[in-house]
Amino acid sequence: MIRRPRRNRQSSSIRSMVKETRLHPSNLVQPIFLVDGNGVRSQVESLPIAYRLSIDEVLKEIKSCIKLGLYNFIMFPAVDEKYKDKDATYSYNPDNFYLKAATTIKKAFPQITLISDVAMDPYSSDGHDGYVKNGEIVNDLTLPILQKMAIAQARAGFDIIGPSDMMDGRVFSIRKALDGANCIDTSIMSYTAKYASAFYGPFRDALDSAPKGGDKKTYQMDPANKREALLEAQLDFEEGADFMMVKPALHYMDVIHLLKEHYDIPIAAYHVSGECAMLLAAAQNGWLNLNKSMDETLLSIHRAGADIIITYFAKMWAEKYQNG
Ligand code: PBG
């Protein structure tokens, strides 16, 4: 045998030298579930490593993440039913606790990156990402609402606006609105290929944001489709997205790879709540080693082409990284 690939695996130092993919805490984004009030830290039952936190607890959480070298956060609000209406008006109300929290966070920790969520579902009495009229999600009536939401978030201090709604034309609409409001330095991380997935369950539990009727299949993508992701990517690129995201991550590695090959802007992947919950549940049963399976999972998403990984494991992984 001329070629013996095992030679390059024979010691830990050689394996380290030939390692093709390395993950660093700077590649990771930690999601935060924000609730109104004070002193709240309530566990999400279907995702036991995640908590709904009030702003005082969020500040403590971010501080401890910074100590671990983790500087990137994406925040989602759990909104009380009383604030929800058809037009999601609370999403751009200056009294909105989510917007106020962003201002407080960025004032306390200007060095971090804070990513928002733009979609109507947390604020909509219909629980859909877009405006519902006669049972239909109306694309073009949604866009002006998303614009107002994005401007309010940029003004509140979010560094990156994250449209997760999958309406057509929203990236351009938001870019135009942000520029018009003189927020030219606020970036857009578009949920470019977001699939109508069964793996969002724990997230919807956490925020109580499941649709009140129907499903999200007329706007989120069909899990069967890959070429369509290229069309979404082309549009988002042309419309001015600064980052493109694939969501979920593990079950869509081929899509991550495809976008990475075709586009020269950073690619993010959202390792979603259900994908994390699977590992946690198996580990709780003693069926998997959580540390090792988490490591392999995040590394694989990175290897597939994701420069950035949004994952509920971010803090846990950063802690492990720091401890060697
Ligand atoms: C909603 C939104 C969802 C997630 C992020 N933003 C759920 C949905 O589309 O119903 C899911 C994230 C996760 O499961 O971790 N705009």
Image (cartoon, grey):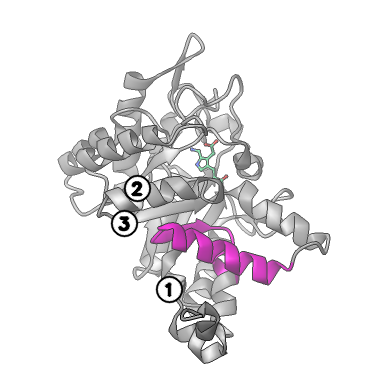
The spot of residue 171 in percent (x, y) is: 28, 37
- Please tell me whether residue 26 is drawn above or below residue 205 in the rendered image: below
Residue at (38%, 34%) from the top-left corner?
227
The spot of residue 28 in percent (x, y) is: 46, 64
**Ligand 1 within 8 angstroms of badge 2 C-beta:** no
Residue 100 lies in the magenta stretch: no
Residue at (82%, 64%) from the top-left corner?
286
Specify the label residue 266 is tagged with: 3
Q: How many marks?
A: 3
The spot of residue 15 in percent (x, y) is: 51, 84
Mark 2 or mark 3: whose residue is earlier in sequence: 2
Q: What is the CA distance from the residue labelled 2 to the residue labelled 1?
A: 20 Å
Quadrant position of the C terminus in the picture: bottom right
In terms of secondary structure, where does tag 2 sit?
A: helix
Cβ–Cβ under 8 Å for marks 2 and 1: no
- Asked if residue 206 shows in the view, the reply is yes
Position of 179 with respect to 28 (left or right) is left
Between 234 and 178, the residue placed more toward the observer is: 234
Q: Which three-letter amino acid code belongs to the residue tagged 3?
A: Pro
Q: Nearer the viewer, mark 2 or mark 1?
A: 1
Position of 125 with respect to 173 (left or right) is right
Q: What is the CA distance from the residue labelled 1 to the residue labelled 3?
A: 19 Å
Per the rendered image, the range of residues in magenta is 289-316
Q: Nearer the viewer, mark 2 or mark 3?
A: 2
Residue at (34%, 68%) from the top-left corner?
110
Q: Which three-letter amino acid code belongs to the residue tagged 1?
A: Glu
Residue holding disc 2: 259
Residue holding disc 1: 20
Q: What is the CA distance from the residue labelled 2 to the residue labelled 3?
A: 10 Å
Q: Nearer the viewer, mark 1 or mark 3?
A: 1
